[in-house]
Structure formats: structure tokens, C-alpha cells
Image (cartoon, grey):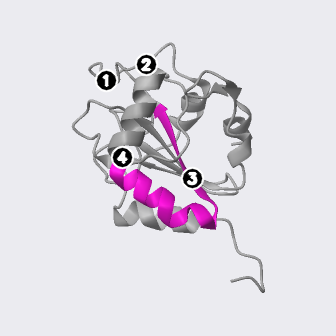
């Protein structure tokens, strides 16, 4: 999955970037939207960020307007909404497509992963989640209605955290 970390992306502010700076951390990659019935999941995502950040974890948000136009905002509007309403501190990247002909290369890789029912392919809706282990070898997929604090999500995050070196606490 090294492609995941080397694929060019842009920050929400439009600057060239990649996920390279997050390599070695467990990640929860999620397509987000501000006007969706699932938008309150931002709260749970931020809680996970705060709980596991010091242990080598980050939520990574990709705004997406492909599902019923539920992320119509500009980068500034998205940033302000996430900050003011949910106190989001995790990285947010540019608005992208997660399905179809214009699917972002990161999602071309992620959508190859099957969920717990063996289904791979298109993202179903906003807030579909992919937990990537710190070593990049394991990716676990969760469909949109699975809440960030679901036991299975927590288990995948904890299993994917960087291994602590002996002698450290």
C-alpha cells in the first residue's frame, strides 16, 4: 500500500501534499460531508483523534460532494464548519471524487478492499471508513453507518497502532 502514502493530494487549502508525513501511523481515512445525516460522525472521529493521536494515529478526512451534493462548501467553508461545529483537528484534504471515472487514486486503491461481508468496490455514501495499520499491511473497511466508536472500528485502530518498543511505556 505504499501507493497510498506517495499519491499526490492537495490540502484543503490547495497546497500540494501526500500522506507521506502520516506514514508509520495508523490511519482512519474517511470521505466526509457537511450536510449529511451522518455528519455528526465528525464528533466521533474527533474523539478518536484525541484518544489515539499520541499513540501514532490520525483520522484523515476527504470532503466529497458526490452523494446528493452534501458537501457543497468551499475549502474555507468546510474548514470553518469543521472547526467551529466539531473542533476538528485532524487533517482535511481537498474535495475529491471517491467513485466513478474521476475517482481519486487513493480511493482507487482503497475501494479494492472488501468490507466484512466480502464486498469491495464503490464507496456507498458519505463517511465510509478505511482503517490502515501503521505498517500499511492491513486495511479494514467499514460502511458509512458504522459509527466511529463502534467496537469493530476501535479494535481495528488498536490492532493497527504502531508497536511500542520494549522498555517504553
Tell me the residue that label 4 is attached to. Answer: 86
Please name the residue that numbered disc 3 is placed on: 58
Crowding at dot 3, Cα within 10 Å, few <14 / some 14-19 / many 20+, comes out as many
Q: Is residue 143 visible?
A: no
The reply to whether the magenta stretch includes residue 66 is no
| Circle 1 residue | 67
- Mark 2 and mark 4 in contact (Cβ < 8 Å)? no
Secondary structure under tag 4 reads helix
Magenta segment boundaries in residue numbering: 43-62
Q: Quadrant of residue 91?
A: top right
Query: Which residue bears the numbered disc 2?
Result: 74
* Residue at the image position 41 percent from the left and 32 percent from the top: 80
Residue 18 position within the rendered picture, expressed as x and y whole percent measured from the top left:
69, 33
Please state which of the two labelled residues, at mark 1 or mark 2, is closer to the viewer: 2
In the rendered structure, the answer to whether residue 123 lies left or right of residue 157 reads left
Which is more foreground, mark 1 or mark 4? 4
Element on which disc 3 rests: strand
> Rounded to the nearest whole Å, what is the CA distance between mark 1 and mark 2?
16 Å
> Do the residues under discs 3 and 1 have CB atoms within 8 angstroms?
no
Amino acid at each position: 500500500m505504499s501507493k497510498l502514502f506517495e499519491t499526490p493530494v492537495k490540502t484543503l487549502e490547495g497546497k500540494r501534499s501526500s500522506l507521506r508525513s502520516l506514514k508509520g501511523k495508523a490511519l482512519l481515512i474517511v470521505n466526509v460531508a457537511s450536510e449529511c445525516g451522518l455528519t455528526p460522525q465528525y464528533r466521533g472521529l474527533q474523539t478518536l483523534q484525541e484518544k489515539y493521536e499520541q499513540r501514532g494515529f490520525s483520522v484523515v478526512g476527504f470532503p466529497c460532494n458526490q452523494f446528493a451534493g452534501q458537501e457543497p462548501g468551499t475549502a474555507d467553508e468546510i474548514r470553518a464548519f469543521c472547526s467551529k461545529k466539531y473542533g476538528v483537528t485532524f487533517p482535511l484534504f481537498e474535495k475529491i471524487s471517491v467513485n466513478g471515472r474521476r475517482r481519486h487514486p487513493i480511493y482507487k486503491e482503497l475501494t479494492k478492499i472488501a468490507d466484512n461481508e466480502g464486498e469491495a468496490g464503490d464507496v456507498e455514501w458519505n463517511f465510509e471508513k478505511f482503517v490502515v495499520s501503521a505498517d500499511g499491511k492491513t486495511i479494514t473497511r467499514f460502511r458509512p453507518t458504522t459509527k466511529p466508536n463502534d467496537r469493530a472500528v476501535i479494535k481495528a485502530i488498536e490492532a493497527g497502532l504502531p508497536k511500542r518498543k520494549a522498555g517504553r511505556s
